[in-house]
């Protein structure tokens, strides 16, 4: 355990020592929330109000709270995963600079080396996405606060789960990479497409039926929906308190991807969390098997 702790400490210190990587990672949530508020807030608001029946009228605060919650969920769904690719740069740098050759001849197993990279990525990503969560909560407070203490606790759990998912996904994808240029290319692709395939930029309900079915098999879809449910739970309760019938509130939730459908059945928030946890275990198991296979090949 002391060797693993040393590896984690060493990888975290390298992240903080690289000022360019550190500040770019820290400022990413700030830039994204500014961009989301500037370009997506009006789109979300127009989409939300267009789904309301003409006979229904709700307060502007409730509408703003719904838009802010949806925007915050989209931002966290993206940053929790994409930031891990930037944070995981240490693993690639060690290969590119030849430092891994020293590790390979040291009496330390490769699974332990890669576990050190993984856990350091989780810890650093949690720090950055914790900042993103605080920024999102501050924005929601300005627009319309409908969150309870329980909702905030669930959001913290959601961020932890999504960071774990992002860390294990980035570790698997980054494992065969050997240069910083390769990581930059992969990071660019992930940053460009992940927001779309997880339903953060546009509701999945607005896509074609075939694409909706494909996306229903992706765990990231349920990670985004999980965040939206916990962000908007208080908003939906506020709508019912203002007299909206439950069926209309449910319809609004459907339009915002809070009730994703898998093979004809709606997926409950608790099931979404289970799907994400199982996905983390499966991807983590694959990552462990790959590193163990690499260790056995080295010994032969």
Image (cartoon, helix red, strand yellow):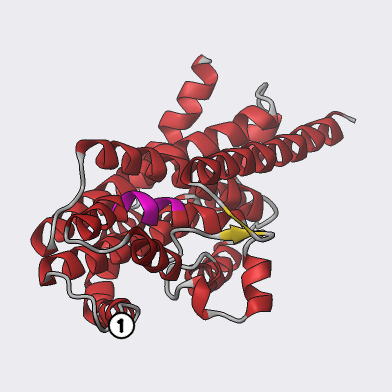
Q: Is residue 288 magenta?
A: no
**Residue drawn where x is 54% and y is 67% of the image:** 190
Give the residue furthest to the top. 1
How many marks overall?
Answer: 1
Q: Which residue is mark 1?
A: 43
Q: What residue range appears in magenta?
A: 226-231
Give the residue furthest to the left. 142
Where is residue 122, by image quadrant?
top left
- Characterize the magenta stretch by its predominant secondary structure: helix
Q: Is residue 241 left or right of residue 6?
A: left
Viewer-side residue, 257 vs 115: 257
Residue 126 x, y percent position in the rendering: 36, 42
Q: Is residue 115 left or right of residue 67?
A: right
Question: Is residue 135 shown above or below 34?
Answer: above
Residue 20 x, y percent position in the rendering: 32, 60
Question: Is residue 294 shown above or below 268?
Answer: above
**Residue drawn where x is 26% and y is 84% of the image:** 54
Q: Is residue 218 visible?
A: yes
Query: Looking at the rendering, in which quadrant would you find the C terminus?
Result: top right
Question: Is residue 105 shown above or below 226?
Answer: above
Question: Regarding mark 1 in the picture, which secondary structure is present there?
Answer: helix
Residue 176 x, y percent position in the rendering: 70, 54
**Residue drawn where x is 13% and y is 60% of the image:** 144
Where is residue 152, by image quadrant?
top left
């Amino acid at each position: 355990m002391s060797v693993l702790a040393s590896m984690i400490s060493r990888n975290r210190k390298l992240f903080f020592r690289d000022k360019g990587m550190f500040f770019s990672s820290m400022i990413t949530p700030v830039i994204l929330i500014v961009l989301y508020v500037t370009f997506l807030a009006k789109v979300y608001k127009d989409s939300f109000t267009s789904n309301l029946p003409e006979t229904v009228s709700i307060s502007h605060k409730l509408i703003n709270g719904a838009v802010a919650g949806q925007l915050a969920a989209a931002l966290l769904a993206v940053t929790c995963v994409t930031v891990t690719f930037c944070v995981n740069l240490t693993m690639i740098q060690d290969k590119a600079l030849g430092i891994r050759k020293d590790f390979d001849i040291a009496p330390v197993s490769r699974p332990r080396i890669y576990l050190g990279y993984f856990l350091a990525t989780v810890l650093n990503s949690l720090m950055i996405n914790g900042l993103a969560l605080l920024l999102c909560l501050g924005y929601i407070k300005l627009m319309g606060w409908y969150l309870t203490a329980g909702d905030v606790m669930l959001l913290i759990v959601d961020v932890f789960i999504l960071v774990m998912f992002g860390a294990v996904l980035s570790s698997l994808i980054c494992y065969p990479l050997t240069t910083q240029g390769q990581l930059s290319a992969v990071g660019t692709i992930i940053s460009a497409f992940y927001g779309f395939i997880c339903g953060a930029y546009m509701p999945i309900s607005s896509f074609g039926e075939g694409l909706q079915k494909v996306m229903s098999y992706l765990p990231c879809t349920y990670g985004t929906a999980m965040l939206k449910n916990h962000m908007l739970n208080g908003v939906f309760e506020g709508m019912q308190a203002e007299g909206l019938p439950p069926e209309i509130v449910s319809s609004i939730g459907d339009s915002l991807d809070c009730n994703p459908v898998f093979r004809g059945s709606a997926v409950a928030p608790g099931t979404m969390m289970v799907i994400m946890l199982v996905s983390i275990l499966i991807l983590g198991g694959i990552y462990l098997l790959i590193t163990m296979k690499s260790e056995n090949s080295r010994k032969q």
